[in-house]
């Protein structure tokens, strides 16, 4: 087995000495106070050297200017090949690029925006897989009618979790303070299909969730059977009227007289 040995590039002396040339190229494009000291050099290949200078621009802290110089074989003059601004240690960098489909958040879609779905979107399934009891099967199987794709079990489960954990679920302050759950409200309109038992639409124009999907165990103060409970005053401590009776401790003589009277009232046969 033949091993290929890589040899480190030897720094060309003429290119290494071209520090002033490299600095002058940077100064032609920026203000003189935006370039700092010479940070060193690095041999890229034969007769190719890159010089590094500190960048003093406050908007690019931690960055450095990189000027690559070179010369032709047997030539004495050094020329500039490239000038770039590179990040150094601790440089402020932009976050990694994220595709738009992963950056999109609920509520970002505006008027006129289009949001296409992938062919293999796991939230959707072919239309012929719809098996809900309340679906018009004749319409589904007729040509030209029916939907090409319907909600898949995965998409349905994700919606259930999202709605139940959201602002229209049972774990909100307004739901905890509600007099009863939405499932017992006359304005609660249950959804059709498999979600009927868990979710519905609020039809109370005065409720904060009017026209929105709410969980059956959600609630608010606009419940159809809500009643105003009269305010009950807290019970107060009893008031003792001491203006008629004098509260005094009985004397020792009175206590002994009470004992004698009690003993004289005992029956004769008592031992």
Image (spheres, rainbow, N blue to C red):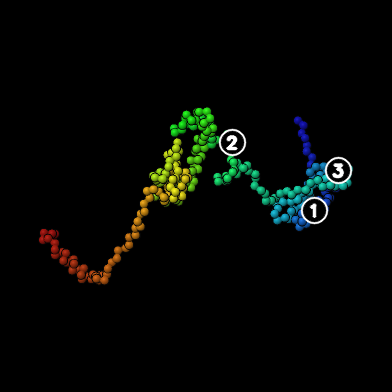
| Labels 3 and 1: the sequence-earlier one | 1
Tell whether label 1 touches label 3 (CB within 8 Å): no
Instruction: Classify mark 1: residues with Cα within 10 Å, few (<14), some (14-19) or many (20+).
Output: few
Q: Can residue 217 be seen?
A: no
Residue marked by disc 1: 28
Observer able to see residue 21: yes
Quarter of the rendering containing residue 117: top right
Q: Residue furthest left?
A: 268
Label 1 secondary element: loop
| 10 Å crowding of disc 2: few (<14), some (14-19), many (20+) | few
Return the residue at label 3: 72
Of tags 3 and 2, the one toward the viewer is: 2
For the C terminus, the quadrant is bottom left
Q: Earlier in the sequence, mark 1 or mark 2?
A: 1
Name the spot of residue 214 as percent of width and height, x first. Answer: 46, 44
* Rendering coords of residue 102 (x, y %): 60, 42
| Disc 2: which residue | 118
Q: CA distance from mark 3 to mark 1?
A: 24 Å
Q: Could you tell whether 143 is left or right of 69 in the image?
A: left
Residue 94 horizontal/vertical position (percent): 66, 48
On the rendered structure, is 100 left or right of 85? left
Q: Secondary structure at mark 2?
A: loop
In the picture as drawn, the residue positioned furthest to the front comes out as 144
CA gap, disc 1 to disc 2?
A: 50 Å
Task: Identify the residue at horizontal 81%, vertical 45% (top origin).
Answer: 81
Quarter holding the N terminus is: top right
Look at the numbered discs 1 and 2 and tell me whether their residues touch, using CB distance below 8 Å: no
Could you say which is closer to the camera, residue 203 or residue 252?
A: 203
Residue at 44% x, 45% y is 202
In front of the other: label 3 or label 1?
1
The structure residue drawn at horizontal position 16% and vertical position 64%, both measured from the top left corner, is 262
């Amino acid at each position: 087995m033949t091993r290929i040995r890589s040899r480190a590039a030897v720094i060309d002396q003429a290119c290494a000495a071209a520090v002033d040339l490299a600095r002058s190229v940077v100064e032609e494009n920026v203000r003189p106070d935006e370039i700092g000291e010479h940070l060193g050099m690095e041999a890229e290949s034969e007769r190719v050297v890159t010089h590094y200078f500190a960048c003093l621009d406050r908007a690019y802290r931690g960055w450095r200017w990189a000027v690559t110089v070179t010369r032709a074989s047997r030539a004495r003059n050094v020329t500039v090949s490239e000038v770039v601004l590179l990040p150094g240690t601790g440089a402020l960098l932009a976050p990694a690029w994220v595709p738009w489909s992963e950056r999109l958040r609920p509520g970002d879609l505006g008027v006129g925006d289009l949001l296409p779905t992938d062919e293999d979107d796991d939230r959707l399934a072919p239309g012929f897989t719809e098996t809900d009891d309340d679906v018009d099967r004749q319409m589904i199987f007729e040509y030209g009618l029916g939907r090409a794709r319907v909600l898949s079990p995965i998409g349905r489960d994700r919606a259930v979790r999202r709605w139940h954990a959201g602002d229209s679920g049972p774990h909100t302050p307004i739901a905890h303070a509600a007099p009863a759950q939405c499932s017992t409200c006359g304005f609660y309109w249950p959804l059709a299909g498999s979600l009927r038992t868990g979710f519905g639409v609020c039809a109370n124009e005065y409720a904060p969730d009017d026209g929105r999907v709410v969980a059956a165990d959600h609630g608010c103060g606009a419940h159809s059977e809500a009643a105003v409970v009269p305010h009950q005053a807290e019970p107060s401590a009893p008031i003792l009227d001491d203006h008629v009776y004098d509260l005094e401790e009985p004397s020792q003589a009175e206590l002994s007289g009470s004992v004698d009277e009690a003993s004289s009232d005992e029956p004769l046969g008592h031992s």
